[in-house]
Image (cartoon, rainbow, N blue to C red):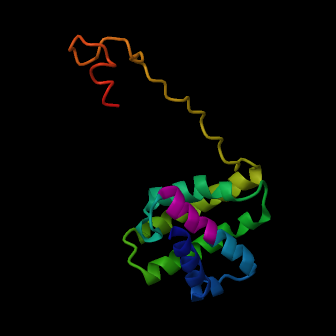
């Protein structure tokens, strides 16, 4: 369902006058950047793009979006223009209550994204290793006294139920 939403939102943006107004950027690059932005928004933040605020936008564009590009990818130079057009499209087609704050935060976040990819610091972080859960209590054997306090062996008390 989310992937269908991303595809529809990307297609709607690509058909908009805002996407057509981006000059000098290959259409495939516009598609890639728009999809990466929308995927990061829906999957990474769990928000619809119209609900973004300045802090969400900074996290999305400066921290999550660079991981979608290959190291020193040349398409990153088009990120500011494409994301600005996408935000304008969203603000004109939906009710985006934080549009002013998002527009103000966009330039700094886009510059940080471009710098991060050009410097090669855009590799996604490896997930932290999680230790398996270890149950701290001793196992109750068949011949141990039942934990209910009856004084009977577990196999004669609650063990016969299972």
Whether residue 25 is visible here, answered yes or no, is: no
Q: From the image, which quarter does the C terminus lie in?
A: top left
Identify the magenta region: 35-45
Q: Is residue 79 magenta?
A: no
Q: Is residue 43 magenta?
A: yes
Q: Please, which residue is most extreme toward the left here?
A: 150
The location of residue 136, given as percent across then percent down, is 42, 19
Q: Is residue 114 above or below residue 143?
A: below
Q: Is residue 135 left or right of residue 150?
A: right
Q: Nearer the viewer, residue 133 or 75?
A: 133
Whether residue 12 is visible here, answered yes or no, is: yes
Q: Is residue 90 left or right of residue 114?
A: left
Which corner quadrant of the image does residue 20 belong to? bottom right
The location of residue 83, given as percent across then percent down, is 59, 70
Q: Nearer the viewer, residue 38 or 98?
A: 38
The location of residue 109, given as percent across then percent down, is 57, 58
Q: Is residue 147 above or below residue 25?
A: above
The number of numbered badges drawn on the structure is 0
Q: Is residue 60 left or right of residue 135?
A: right
Q: Nearer the viewer, residue 26 or 39?
A: 39
The location of residue 26, given as percent across then percent down, is 76, 79
Q: Is residue 149 left or right of residue 138?
A: left
Q: Residue at x 73, y 77 (%)?
A: 28
Q: Residue at x 47, y 66 (%)?
A: 102
Principal secondary structure, stretch drawn in magenta: helix
Q: Residue at x 75, y 67 (%)?
A: 75
Q: Residue at x 45, y 68 (%)?
A: 48
């Amino acid at each position: 369902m989310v992937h269908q939403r991303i595809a529809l939102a990307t297609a709607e943006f690509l058909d908009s006058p805002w996407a057509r107004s981006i000059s000098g950027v290959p259409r495939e690059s516009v598609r890639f950047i728009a999809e990466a932005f929308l995927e990061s928004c829906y999957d990474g933040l769990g928000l619809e793009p119209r609900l973004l605020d300045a802090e969400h936008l900074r996290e999305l564009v400066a921290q999550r979006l660079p991981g979608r590009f290959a190291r020193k990818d040349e398409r990153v130079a088009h990120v500011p223009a494409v994301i600005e057009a996408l935000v304008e499209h969203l603000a004109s087609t939906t009710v985006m209550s934080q549009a002013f704050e998002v527009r103000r935060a966009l330039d700094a976040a886009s510059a940080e994204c471009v710098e991060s990819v050009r410097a090669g610091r855009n590799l996604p972080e490896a997930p932290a290793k999680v230790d398996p859960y270890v149950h701290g209590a001793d196992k109750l054997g068949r011949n141990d006294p039942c934990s209910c306090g009856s004084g009977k062996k577990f196999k004669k008390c609650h063990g016969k139920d299972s």
